[in-house]
């Protein structure tokens, strides 16, 4: 998966300054989902082309992401 490699390109310094645009809370890097997760908002901010998309309207609900992950692992 290329997505996984892209996640590795995010520098730790950048991760440290990134915060959830909704609650300003800490984000957790989830390589499995190629994005940054806010546990408080239960949202996934996707990383596209090595750039985290820090827009609440672009974020995906975690429930949706987990559902997709389950169905893809069955295939
Ligand atoms: Zn949040």
Image (spheres, rainbow, N blue to C red):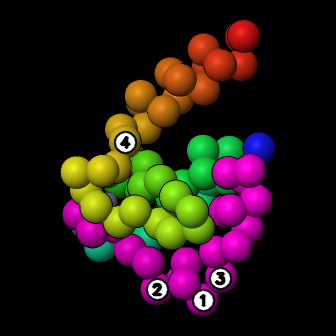
Answer whether residue 37 is visible to the viewer in this image.
no
Instruction: Point out the quarter of the image occupied by ligand 1.
Output: bottom left
Residue 49's image quarter?
A: bottom right
Tell me how far mark 2 sits from mark 4, CA to CA.
21 Å
In the image, residue 66 above or below residue 14: above
Residue 27 falls inside the magenta stretch: no
Tell me how far mark 4 sits from mark 3, CA to CA.
23 Å
Q: Which residue is mark 4?
A: 60
Q: Which residue is mark 3?
A: 12
Which residue: 67% across, 51% down?
A: 3
Q: Residues within 10 Å of mark 2 (few under 14, many from 20)?
A: few
Q: Which residue is mark 2?
A: 17
Quadrant the N terminus occupies: top right
Q: Residues within 10 Å of mark 1 (few under 14, many from 20)?
A: few
- Judged left or right of residue 51, residue 6 is right
Do tag 4 and tag 3 residues touch (Cβ < 8 Å)? Answer: no
Which residue: 23% across, 63% down?
A: 22
SS class, disc 4: strand
In the rendered structure, which disc, 2 or 3, sits on the residue that comes first in sequence?
Answer: 3
In the rendered structure, which disc, 2 or 4, sits on the residue that comes first in sequence?
Answer: 2
Tell me how far mark 1 sits from mark 2, CA to CA.
7 Å
Tell me how far mark 3 sits from mark 1, CA to CA.
4 Å
- Which stretch is magenta? 2-22
Q: Which residue is mark 1?
A: 13
Q: Main secondary structure of the magenta part?
A: helix
Do tag 1 and tag 2 residues touch (Cβ < 8 Å)? Answer: yes
Tell me how far mark 4 sits from mark 1, CA to CA.
24 Å
SS class, disc 2: helix
């Amino acid at each position: 998966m290329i997505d996984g490699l892209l996640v590795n390109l995010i520098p730790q310094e950048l991760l440290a300054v990134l915060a959830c645009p909704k609650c300003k809370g800490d984000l957790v890097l989830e390589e499995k989902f190629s994005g940054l997760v806010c546990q408080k908002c239960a949202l996934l901010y996707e990383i596209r082309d090595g750039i985290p998309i820090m827009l609440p309207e672009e974020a995906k609900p975690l429930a949706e992401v987990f559902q997709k992950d389950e169905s893809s692992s069955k295939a």
